[in-house]
Image (cartoon, helix red, strand yellow):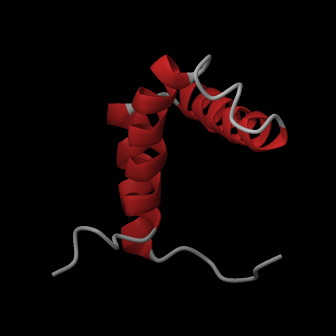
Amino acid sequence: MSTNTLSKEAETRLIDFFNHIIDPEDMAKILRQVNCILALAVMRQHETFQIGLTNFEDNYYWVNELAEILNPYLSEE
């Protein structure tokens, strides 16, 4: 478990993200769906991946958006 705290900038971006872009409950659902699909795909040797592919593409976007807010890796020059 990490004892690091968020920077004020990251905290502000997260608040803005959850207040204006996506509901926290929807984000939690997306994270769980992506996690489940990936785990099942690996466990079942990729048989399950096609079942969740429709939602996966949209959900991948939101997981990436959250990651960019927490650590803006792709937006840095």
Query: Does residue 21 appear left or right of residue 60 in this picture?
Result: left
Q: Quadrant of residue 25?
A: top right
The N terminus, quarter of image = bottom right
Place of residue 34 in the rendered image (x, y in percent of width and height, measured from the top left): 62, 36
On screen, 31 above or below 56?
below
On screen, 6 above or below 65?
below
On screen, 4 above or below 75?
below
Q: Quadrant of residue 31?
A: top right
Query: Does residue 32 appear left or right of residue 54 in this picture?
Result: right
The C terminus, quarter of image = bottom left
Question: Residue at coordinates 75% horizontally, 82% vertically from top-left?
Answer: 3
Q: Nearer the viewer, residue 40 or 55?
A: 40
Q: Nearer the viewer, residue 74 or 46?
A: 46
Q: Nearer the viewer, residue 57 or 67?
A: 57
Place of residue 47 in the rendered image (x, y in percent of width and height, measured from the top left): 71, 27
Question: Residue at coordinates 36% horizontally, 57% vertically from top-left?
Answer: 13
Q: Nearer the viewer, residue 3 or 75?
A: 75
Question: Residue at coordinates 22% horizontally, 77% vertically from top-left?
Answer: 76
Query: Does residue 55 appear left or right of residue 22 in this picture?
Result: right
Question: Residue at coordinates 46% horizontally, 40% vertically from top-left?
Answer: 60
Place of residue 71 in the rendered image (x, y in percent of width and height, measured from the top left): 43, 71
Q: Disc count in the image?
A: 0
Residue lying farthest to the left in this orientation? 77
Place of residue 8 in the rendered image (x, y in percent of width and height, measured from the top left): 43, 73
